[in-house]
Image (spheres, helix red, strand yellow):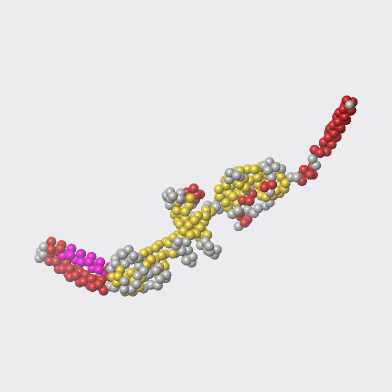
Amino acid sequence: MRKKIKKNKKSIIAVCLLIVALFLVFKPKYNQANPAQASANILEVNVVAVKKQKIQLTQELPGRVEALRISEVRPQVDGIIRKVKFIEGSFVKEGQQLYQINPTVYKIALQTADANLKALKAKKERYQNLVELDAVSKQEYDDAVASYESAKATAELARNNLDYTKVMAPISGYIGKNNITEGRLVTKNQADVLTTITQLDPIYIDMAQPTREMLKLGNQKEIKVTVLTDDPTYKNSGTLKFSEVFADESTDSVRLRAIFSNKDGKLIPGMFVTGKLHLKPIEAVIVPQKATTRTPDGNLLVFVVKEGIAKARSIKAEQTYNDNWVVIEGLEDGEFVILEGYQKIADGAKVNPVEVVVPSIEEKK
């Protein structure tokens, strides 16, 4: 029995030695890499050379259309409206008559004032001759002069009141709804307006800009502004007129105002639009947006290829230009980044780069 166990142990040991010998003999065959196969395992990726280019950045800001001028028309004398002399919604010119207030009382007042003025003028002239002859005292002459001046002012007031019975348009523009009809009594400077006139050409667009974006305007004096509206045919452009010097504490923004020509009447007060500021051209490295990805913490990431090795790199970009990121940190002019295929590789992977030529900004224009 013992001899049989020893014999089995020797057989097992012999088999183990044989397996080890076979492994050592065939090991190089399993470990030796096939050069052609190794090359085939390297992933081919499309890369693009990033370039420093001259670009014109823009800022898109929410805006609202505001009229250049709005005039509320009110009477300046009391009286009954005898006639309304305009059509609602029409264009009226400055100085055009809008209403006629009954002028009878004011005509009589002017006639009375003129007659009194004429009499006091004659008295003043007569006293002037008499005072030189010492026929009247200097005090009497001074009183006559004062009475004449007072009568002249009264006559001027009466003449103005008569003129005010014709209610004129204070500005040129489009007139709104008529709030009064013939036969109604109106009073001087009443709270209720008779109508409203709005000047629509030129016209303002007020925009709200975050204070952190203010510095990007720099010292530009002439900033072109365009408007994005629901009308694709709208092509008018305007100019930035001014910006507030104080920020709104509730929104942390400043107000910008641009002025536009509005001869076509496509912009009306109260419209919400998007204003587009065209900033001064700058030189910057740009990278296609599709060549970037986001890390879990929100940073932008690209894969830079150098000598066949792909390395992940964080970049900093705060603005876009068309479908590109404007890079302010992390990339140098002429470096190659993976445009397509970076999703399939890891940091430090070997890649086979194939350059894709992307037209420059100038070429696209």
Q: Is residue 219 visible?
A: no
Residue 89 image-quadrant placement: bottom left
Of residue 279 and residue 104, the one placed in the foreground of this image is 104
Instruction: Give left or right: position of 346 versus 119.
Output: right
Quick check: 41 above or below 185? above
> In the rendered structure, which segment of residues is drawn in magenta?
144-160
Q: Quadrant of the C terminus?
A: bottom right
In the image, residue 84 lies in the stretch drawn in magenta: no
Which residue is depicted at the point 18% across and 63% down? Answer: 146
Q: In the rendering, at what x and y percent does residue 304 appear?
A: 66, 44
Q: In the rendering, at what x and y percent does residue 282 appear?
A: 55, 50
Quick check: 21 above or below 141? above
Quick check: 148 above or below 282? below
Count of numbered marks = 0
Look at the magenta stretch and give its main secondary structure.
helix
Q: In the rendering, at what x and y percent does residue 289 appear?
A: 61, 51
Q: Quadrant of the N terminus?
A: top right
Q: Residue furthest front?
A: 1
